[in-house]
Image (cartoon, rainbow, N blue to C red):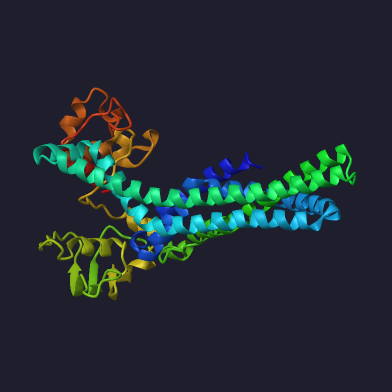
Amino acid sequence: MSQISPIMNSYYSVKCCRKMMDLDYDMLEGKEEQKLIGNAWRTIRRGYDFYIACQGLQDCITALLAVVFYGIIIGRKNILLVVLMIFSVAMSMFLLSLARKKHAEYHERLSRYSKEAAYISRQAIESSAGKDIRIYNMLDLFLKKYDEALDGLGNIFAGIHNWYFLRSLSDALIGFLVDAFAWGFLLWMLVQNKLTAAEFVLYLGLVSGFSAYLETLIRGVMQLGPMSVSISYLREFMGLRNHWGEDKEDKEKCELENSVTIELCDVSYTYPGNETPTLSHVNLKINSGEKLAVLGLNGAGKTTLVKLICGFYQPTEGYILVNGRPITDYNREKYYGALSVLFQDAIVLPVSIDMNLTGQMEEKIDREKLEWALKMSGIYEKYQSLPEKGNTRMVRDVNENALDYSGGEMQKLLFARALYKE
């Protein structure tokens, strides 16, 4: 059974990745959805919950049967022994649960310091952050904040370990007293000729086995609860339904034509948790072939406007029409396929330039269209000068032979990617 848990973990990792990339974009930014996504990914990363799901129940059943069997045999000699061993194991589990409760109380502060330390250490090895660290002489500040984060973690872990040490000390004391009583009682019965030497050895093994199986049973039951909660996070995440694109068959007939008109009708948008709308009662019509520049201060809502037109967000008020139809009347994938956007932040994969620009495998790439896109974006000569041309790998962190590109060159490459979609 334990060999199945890594397979399950890998299986659900792939399913979660696929689910994440298929969710409506606004869900990725929703507060409740982010919390659920975080909990689901923690379940995947830990992997331990899958082991408990596969092995824990089996162990609990085995331990339960052993506890009942051993308990009946020992109880026939002296029920007090059974009661004391149950008390010993129960106290051990109670102290453990108390230590875990205190651990949970420290968790929020622990999370803050661990995130801060992880962020600083991650930025310390990022070449993109290296320029700022050097030019603005941030080395001492980085190290100071890193030390503060590590000191914060150390202080919190010291408090946590104190509780676990107290549990271990109390557990050892109670266990010693119970074992002393059990040994003393069995020795007394041996001296009184109420037990033979063979029975004495047998009952010592039964007492030890009873305590071990009872602890296994209680630990298993304690683990089943958190495991159930973790698995329910995963199940709830996988059950999230997109607001747009569910009824694909009904939307296949709503085709986008070459001539497209976009109209925003009294559109407002307020980000979740904000009281002030980022966009308020916007009316705008963009005719086919029209070129439009949107200017505004930082935070004025330019990117939000683009994301609304892309269908990433749904208007808080009003509606957006494309060729006279609401955006959600169209098949989601086909609607995205009709758009090209060059965002401020973009992602490239550790594959060839051609695959990054086209999003297609080598055999499916339209070479004529790609050459046109490269020339239009002004990066064709650079592309041709590369020893492996379009087979050149990207992302130096993954491919040691990959090339680095200047900020302007990267923008041109991304522009070519947008143009490839026509």
Give the side of residue 199 with respect to residue 402, left or right.
right
46 with respect to 388 (left or right): right
Q: Residue at x 33, y 56 (%)?
A: 336
Viewer-proximal residue among 401 and 229: 229
The answer to whether 17 is drawn above or below residue 335 in the figure is above
Query: Picture coordinates of residue 25 (x, y %)?
Result: 35, 59
Residue 327 is left or right of residue 58, and the answer is left
Q: Nearer the viewer, residue 7 or 55?
A: 55
* Residue in the picture at 26% in, 38% down: 370
Compare residues 375 and 226 and report the one nearer the observer.
226
Residue 358 vs 320, above or below: the answer is: above
At x 35%, y 64%, the residue is 30
Q: Is residue 103 left or right of residue 210?
A: left
Q: Is residue 279 above or below residue 298?
A: below
Residue 15: x and y, percent? 50, 49
* Residue 62 percent across, percent down from the top left: 74, 48
> Image point 24% across, 66% down: which residue?
262
Number of dots carrying numbers? 0
- Placement of the N terminus among the 4 image quadrants: top right
Residue lying at the far top in this picture: please name it: 387
Whether residue 58 is visible, yes or no, is no
Q: Quadrant of residue 403?
A: top left
Picture quadrant of residue 285: bottom left
Report x, y in % for residue 322.
29, 67
**Residue 141 seen in render:** yes
